[in-house]
Amino acid sequence: MSKTIKLKKGFDIKLVGKAEKQLGDFKSAKTFALKPTDFIGMQRPKVTVSEGDKVKVGTPILFDKAMEAVQYVAPVSGEIVEIKRGDRRKLLEIKILADAENSYESFDKFSEDALKSLSKEDAVAQMCKGGVWPQIIQRPFGIVANPEDAPKAIFISAFDSHPLAPDYGFLLEGEEKYFQAGLNILSKLTSGKVHLNVDGNAQVSAIFANAKGIELNKFSGPHPAGNVGVQIHHLNPINKGEVAWTVNPYGVVQIGKLFLDGKYDASKKIAITGSEAKKAVYVKTAIGACVDTLVEGNTKQDNIRVVSGNVLTGERINRDGYIGYYHHQITLLPEGDQYEFLGWMKPTASKLSYHRALGLLSFLNPKKEFVLDTNTNGEERAFVQTGVFEDVTPMDILPVYLLKAIMAEDFDEMEELGIYEIVEEDLALCEFVDVSKHPVQEIVRKGIDLIQYS
């Protein structure tokens, strides 16, 4: 039975630079990279190619020795030009110089009718071999799912409420057939429900509204209403010993293409966003694309920060860095490396703050979009008990006490206070509103690692 859930807690960060719903004309990226650091929990990555090797789209180039069945494959065809390592030979990137035209590895191809009789075991085997399995993320812990597990349910958030987030309906326009095929495959992987959660504040795109074989739920409210972890909490909370899986809508389409077309398709649209982008538009590229062609000549100034993803949970990259595996946007922001006299003590209407004492004038115009730089306006200090963390977390947990339990490495308290229900993005707003400047997301990951590997 479908549910409609209205959330009151949270906060929308309104920024200048949302992408227009049109495709921009940019040069194609020449190099692409697969970054093991994108896959949280990958313990022992093993490279299966060497520099100079030729690969096709879908050629296995990496796997985790802790889960060898799951293959990580090339997003484009071309030549392996660099296997980049860091300290202690930690694997950082596998770079591919792309061919002018892609060639593909072939996988088993199924008609829509044949998918109905496909067994769970055969579906899992094809997904692992065909490179799409890493799109399935396990809760708790937020890691790539283990194919041997049996999830109690699968959850798909069909909207993103992060600042300047792309529109999934536009990202997946024309992909209805593949989205439905992906849903049909996912339904074979669980004895529970496949939950498709849409934005209750907006018109639902046809690709989601017409989906079959799922439970369609509507969530409305401020960010983080679009976070799948928040949605799970209100639909079917995760308890100790339970496992649920999550998939991004793009991942669902990619699964559908693998089975209907018999190939791994890493092509995708991403949004170029942020106040410093001359052209805030969408562009068609592929997983792991170099952003140099999207940034060069497309910035309003030179002193900027390039973020793969959104401003709350994204990763800072160089101007010639690579889009994260799970990211669907890049954000161009002014760098916050200049000292400002009096800082937050100076009354102004140009700054956004959740706290009325610090950003009172910004509340006079709640619809205003802001240009914010990356300055944190302070350094880490002791926790200030304001109750604000609870105000922006629409979950039945106590964020401050949970964070303190993590810092104290109190395992029993962590479990009782809800560590199994969250990953970094679920408390990212706490980091934004924290006057004590704590690295909340780093603390959350530390707690998850402690629980997972203890």
Image (cartoon, grey):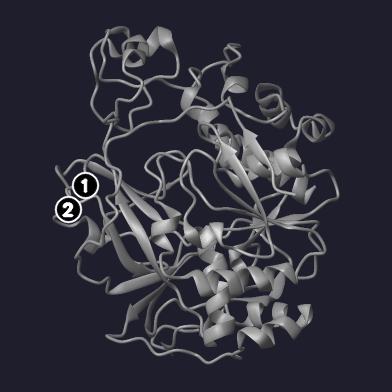
Q: Quadrant of residue 103?
A: bottom left
Residue underneath mark 1: 277
Question: How busy is the neighbourhood of tag 1: few (under 14 within 10 Å), some, or many (20 plus)?
Answer: many
Q: Are marks 2 and 1 in contact (CB under 8 Å)?
A: yes
Task: Look at 41% across and 65% down and name the residue there.
Answer: 173
Q: Secondary structure at mark 1?
A: loop
Task: Look at 22% across and 61% down and name the residue there.
Answer: 24
Image coordinates for residue 39, horizontal then vertical, percent: 57, 60
Q: Quadrant of residue 46?
A: bottom right
- In-front residue for pair 303/262: 262
The disc placed on residue 298 is 2
The answer to which of marks 2 and 1 sits earlier in the sequence is: 1
Image coordinates for residue 135, horizontal then vertical, percent: 58, 65
Image coordinates for residue 113, horizontal then vertical, percent: 66, 86
Q: Is residue 290 above or below residue 100?
A: above
Distance, label 2 to label 1, CA atoms, is 6 Å
Q: Secondary structure at mark 2?
A: loop
Q: Quadrant of residue 344?
A: top left
The disc placed on residue 68 is none
Q: In this rendering, would 25 be left or right of 238?
A: left
- In-front residue for pair 79/274: 274
- In-front residue for pair 181/189: 181
Question: How busy is the neighbourhood of tag 2: few (under 14 within 10 Å), some, or many (20 plus)?
Answer: some
Image coordinates for residue 342, horizontal then vertical, percent: 27, 9
The three-letter code of the residue at mark 2 reads Asn
The three-letter code of the residue at mark 1 reads Ala
